[in-house]
Amino acid sequence: MRKFMSAILAAVTFLSIPLVAWASPPTQTTAGGTLLSHTQTLVRTADGNLTFDAEDTVAFTGGITGTVTDTYVFTAHPDGSITGHGTETCAVCTIGGRTGGYTEVFGFSATANFATFEGHFTVISAGGGLSGLRGTGTFQGAGFTETINVQYHFEPT
């Protein structure tokens, strides 16, 4: 009887301990993006610098699929260089076999007229099937296309 009671006590103790949820392992993926639309508005000039508000729609295929909206500010400097920062949102994207929405922040630099550009980004929030998504990465491109490289994982929610 004592062994039976000890087994019952051990089972009750084990079942009362909360199960630990683990983050998924880091995953590296690459995707290609194609610019679908672009709008920009000049918002100020100062010391030869031109600052614009802009919005792009980009379609991604590969390790990330879906159509995103980039909302950003960029400054064209007198030497022809361009710098900027903004946010990217996707209402319905698929990453790692999961589908949902996400928001990331990004910063970038470019040559005149965005002949080439490069930058970095960090995922700051995600929902739906992408809840718990955490990631950082880089992007580079020319003209109307870009390639992104991202390392991501999913944390328990």
Image (cartoon, rainbow, N blue to C red):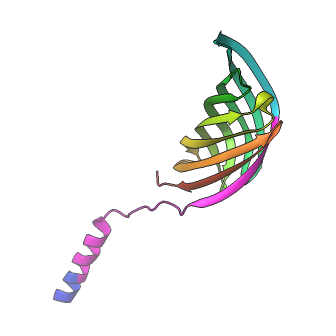
Which of the 4 quarters of the picture holds residue 139?
top right
Indicate left or right for 157 with 94 as reference: left
Note whether 7 is above or below 73 in the view shown.
Answer: below
Q: Nearer the viewer, residue 81 or 5?
A: 81
Q: Quadrant of the N terminus?
A: bottom left
Per the image, is 20 magenta?
Answer: yes
Q: Which residues are magenta?
A: 7-35
Percent x, y of residue 2: 16, 87
Indicate left or right for 66 with 25 as reference: right
Q: Nearer the viewer, residue 8 or 121?
A: 121
Percent x, y of residue 47: 63, 12
The residue at the point 61 percent across, 35 percent down is: 107
Note whether 27 is above or below 7 in the view shown.
Answer: above
Which of the 4 quarters of the picture holds residue 4?
bottom left
The residue at the point 58 percent across, 45 percent down is: 128
Percent x, y of residue 103: 59, 37
Q: Residue furthest left?
A: 2
Residue 1 visible to the viewer:
no
Which of the 4 quarters of the picture holds residue 39?
top right
The residue at the point 61 percent across, 32 percent down is: 87
Percent x, y of residue 20: 38, 63
The residue at the point 61 percent across, 30 percent down is: 85
Note whether 137 is above or below 29 in the view shown.
Answer: above
Residue 64 visible to the viewer:
yes
Per the image, is 33 magenta?
Answer: yes
